[in-house]
């Protein structure tokens, strides 16, 4: 999550000779310090916990956030965890197995159809509107906005997931409208 808005190309309409007017520029942070890394989860029932990561994702973060989120969302025992397998250490895989958490088979370097990517985008748009100026404010605003994401949005992502995957399979892994 970037401190100064969404990391993407922007266009500005401006008058001639006004290129460097402050209202036509976007601030940046040089040499790092302008973003934070977050871990989050959701289900069809809504968003789970959002956690700022200082280091790497490991089984401790999952233990402190995934299981409490599953309980808070009243997931019961018959849920499947989807995550990016290229970021999974051996210790994390062992922890998931020990906790008997069913993991969705998901090849690394596959089309990025993980539905949480849609929520990350939604969060970035919401946070950018509030224009945080410090990293601590960024974290606080991210958590506030994450909690405001409507459960209906999460339910819609889950409901349409099968359709998205079927489209990728039908197109043999090539681009789809999703």
Image (cartoon, rainbow, N blue to C red):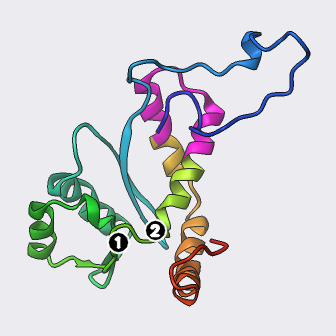
Tell me the element at label 2.
loop
Q: Which residue is drawn at 59% across and 19% down?
A: 27
Label 2: which residue?
114
Question: Residue 120's spot in the image, x, y percent?
Answer: 51, 52
Q: What is the chief secondary structure element of the magenta stretch? A: helix
Total tally of numbered discs in the picture: 2
Compared to residue 6, the image places residue 44 above or below, namely below
Position of 80 with respect to 156 (left or right) is left
Position of 152 with respect to 84 (left or right) is right
Q: Residue at x 9, y 61 (%)?
A: 91
Mark 2 packing: few (<14 Cα in 10 Å), some, or many (20+)? some
Measure the alpha-carbon separation of dots 1 and 2.
8 Å
Closer to the camera in the image, 47 or 162: 162
The label number, if any, that marks residue 108 in the structure image: none
Q: Residue at x 50, y 67 (%)?
A: 115
The label number, if any, that marks residue 82 in the structure image: 1
Quadrant containing the C terminus is bottom right
Position of 16 with respect to 160 (left or right) is right
Most extreme residue toward the right is 15
Compared to residue 117, the image places residue 39 above or below, namely above
| Marks 1,2: beta carbons within 8 A | yes
What residue range appears in magenta? 124-142
Question: Residue 56's spot in the image, x, y percent?
Answer: 22, 45
Question: Residue 165's spot in the image, x, y percent?
Answer: 52, 82
Q: Does the magenta stretch include residue 106?
A: no
């Amino acid at each position: 999550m970037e401190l100064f808005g969404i990391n993407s190309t922007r266009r500005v309409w401006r008058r001639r000779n006004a290129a460097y007017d402050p209202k036509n520029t976007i601030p940046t942070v040089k040499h790092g310090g302008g973003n934070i890394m977050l871990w989050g989860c959701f289900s069809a029932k809504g968003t789970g916990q959002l956690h700022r990561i200082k280091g790497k994702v490991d089984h401790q973060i999952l233990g402190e956030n995934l299981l409490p989120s599953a309980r808070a969302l009243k997931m019961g025992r018959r849920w499947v965890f989807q995550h990016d397998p290229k970021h999974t250490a051996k210790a994390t895989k062992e922890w998931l197995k020990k906790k008997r958490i069913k993991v969705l088979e998901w090849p690394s370097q596959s089309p990025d159809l993980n539905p949480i990517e849609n929520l990350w985008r939604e969060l970035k748009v919401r946070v950018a509107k509030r224009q945080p100026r410090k990293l601590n404010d960024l974290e606080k605003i991210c958590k506030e906005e994450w909690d405001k994401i409507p459960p209906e949005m999460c339910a819609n992502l889950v409901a349409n997931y099968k359709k998205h995957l079927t489209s990728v399979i039908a197109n043999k892994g090539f681009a789809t409208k999703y």
